[in-house]
Amino acid sequence: MRSRGLRGAAVVAGLSVLVCAPPAFAAPGDPGGPRYSAGAPSVGDPYFPSEGNGGYDVRHYDVVFSYDPATKRMDATTTITAVATQDLDRFDLDFRGPEIGSLTVGKHPASFRREGQELVVTPRPKLKNGERFTVQVKYAGTPPVITDPDDSIEGWVPTDDGAFVPGEPQGSPAWLPGNDHPTDKATFTFHATVPEGITVVGNGQLLSQTTTGGRTTFVWDSTEPMATYLATVTLGRFQVARSVTPSGVPVYTAVDPQLASQSAATVARIPDIVEYFSSLFGPYPFASTGAIIDKAPDVGYALESQTKPIFSSAPSLGTMAHELAHQWFGDSVSLKRWSDIWLNEGFATYAQWLWTEHNGGATAQQTFDSASNYGRAATSSFWQTVLTDPGPVDMFGNVPYNRGAMTLHALRGKIGDAAFFTLLKDWATTHKYGNATTADFVAAAQSASGKDLKGFFDVWLYQKGKPATW
Ligand code: ZN
């Protein structure tokens, strides 16, 4: 799909050079003057080489759209507010959505072209390092379903009454142009208009819900920094309920009526789970919590979308605990690169073990020892992957989840409960709303324990094979 506006925009850009030439004291090429170049087309994450872009830092996404489940048509205007981190004569967004009608940078139409998931934008006037700018993209059509390296699906997944919208690890560009890598977090506002009777559930807090002429507009405000893959605007027919956790965090739940009775007992425990994890990991990091439970059988997994995890079927209590634990580990503290996925999945899985024990089920030690964990034979393929590099096909497989959780449990045994739980709390506090790596965690564990843990982490994180001693 090629840009129809290219020729017109080039004329405008040519004119703007004539009428506002850059000041003579800072002409391009002068020492100290701007040195314009193209922002990088990727952040260089080997698992998803097209994800993310360089040259700017997104601060806010404002997404205004209407969607009709009957026609599957979206009409959208996304406005991105960003700050240039270099002098830019060109930059990329990640976008795999429908046809673009217009694109402006600030007040000026900009030329653009699309190459795979790269949306290449040529802003005129050019952008100076440190400059705050807006990009407004208008697009319309049917957003795509995206297939992952492991053949699972994400992006914009139509359901019988709306759409299920998961974005990990590369789904958000299906419906949202942006900088699709967890290292560029931003705040988000969604204004979504749908036929009356449909509910749109986004991240953050519901600012308003207004119905006129048979259409309802929902405004959702996500007030803490969020990675693009955690954005959702899942929509359909939902039973909505509100409550509050014992600490006062507002809870908003949306449940597909067909799953209401199967989900009720699990949904009722959300306040307890959030409260328990707050006691272990420190205060819940966001302004609200909740859950979205929908029927999307072709998706088949749940996702920790920020403030409101989404479930493609009625969740078990363990899965609910897992996704809520991700609010601390994954959402607030995020990865710097996808190969460190165990920092998300291992932590959420271990939190799930802790919840299960707290709730009167198997102890964490029993789960560690079980046949699907440490009980697996040394010859099992389970042990033949390096935990810190599972690869894009197996990043949501058994290894990051279960060996990740086992690593934490083994660490707890090694350094003792006091140091271990201080470490988890400090980890959530130090990197709140930020990004961290395995090396950061190893360093934090060493300093929390005062121990040399090189041998320990070697066998658990960096080597293949079933650890025998540590
Ligand atoms: Zn998870």
Image (spheres, rainbow, N blue to C red):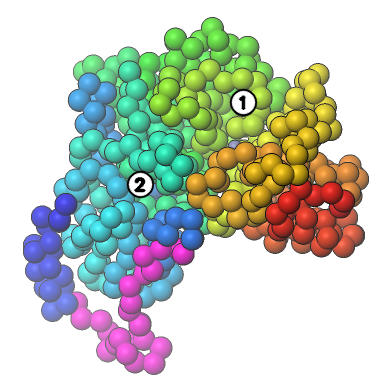
Name the residue: 82% across, 62% down.
454
Residue at the limit of the structure toward the front, as seen here: 379
- Disc 2 marks a residue whose amino acid type is Pro
Residue designated by label 1: 320
Quadrant observed for ligand 1 in the rendered image: top right
Name the residue: 69% across, 25% down.
273
Horizontal relation, residue 6 to residue 103: left or right: left
Q: Is mark 2 on a helix, strand or loop?
A: helix
Q: Is the Cβ of the residue at disc 2 closer than 8 Å to that at disc 1?
A: no
Q: Which one is nearer the viewer's eye here, 284 or 174? A: 174
Q: Which one is nearer the viewer's eye here, 84 or 304? A: 304
Q: In this view, does 160 lie above or below 104?
A: above
Q: Is residue 438 above or below residue 328?
A: below
Any magenta on residue 78? no
Q: Position of residue 135 (x, y in %)?
A: 30, 56
Give the extent of the magenta segment: 19-44
Label 1 CB less than 8 angstroms from ligand 1: no
Name the residue: 78% across, 35% down.
375
Any magenta on residue 20? yes
Q: Which one is nearer the viewer's eye here, 110 or 46? A: 46
Q: Which label's residue is closer to the chain start, 2 or 1? A: 2
- Disc 1 marks a residue whose amino acid type is Met
Q: Which one is nearer the viewer's eye here, 90 or 244? A: 90
Residue 276: numbered disc: none
Residue 173: numbered disc: 2
